[in-house]
Image: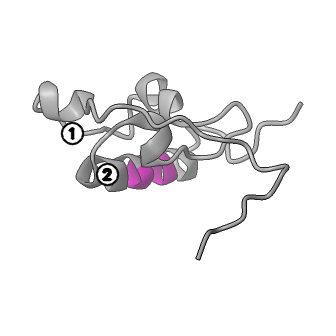
Amino acid sequence: MMQRKNRFQKRERPVAKNCPFCKGKTDPDYKDSGALSRYMSERGKILGMSRTGICSKHQRAVTHAIKLARHVALLPFVVRA
């Protein structure tokens, strides 16, 4: 069966899998809030693997590091406009 698309649904362009953590042989660190903010939207949401291009192992690590940085008050939970 053919799946119907919602006419309001945006088409996301896939990003190539170029994991900077695999290339540099590093792991995401919760103390590096500048690097972690690259993986968050302007509203403060964590971006998915299809938008960031990092591998699944490091996506889970980035998510954990962002949540830890929020609890230690290095990153905001909600960005107010």
Most foreground residue, 17 or 64: 17
Q: Give the x, y percent position of residue 3.
A: 64, 68
Q: Mark 1 points at which residue?
A: 27
The residue positioned farthest toward the front in the image shown: 1
Q: Give the x, y percent position of residue 49.
A: 42, 46
Is most of the magenta stretch helix, strand or loop?
helix
Residue lying at 55% horizontally and 53% vertically, measured from the top left: 71
Contact (CB < 8 A) between labels 1 and 2?
yes
Quadrant of the image occupied by residue 1: bottom right
- The amino acid at mark 2 is Ala
Q: In the structure shown, which secondary structural element does the residue marked by tag 2 occupy?
A: helix
Structural crowding at the residue carrying mark 2, measured as other residues with C-alpha within 10 Å and reported as few (<14), some (14–19) or many (≥20): some
Residue lying at 29% horizontally and 53% vertically, measured from the top left: 56
Q: Which mark is residue 61?
A: 2
Most foreground residue, 51 or 44: 51
Q: What stretch is highlighted in magenta?
A: 63-68
Q: Give the x, y percent position of residue 12.
A: 59, 40
Judged left or right of residue 66, residue 5 is: right
- The amino acid at mark 1 is Asp
Structural crowding at the residue carrying mark 1, measured as other residues with C-alpha within 10 Å and reported as few (<14), some (14–19) or many (≥20): some
Residue lying at 84% horizontally and 51% vertically, measured from the top left: 7
Q: In this view, does 25 lie above or below 44?
A: above
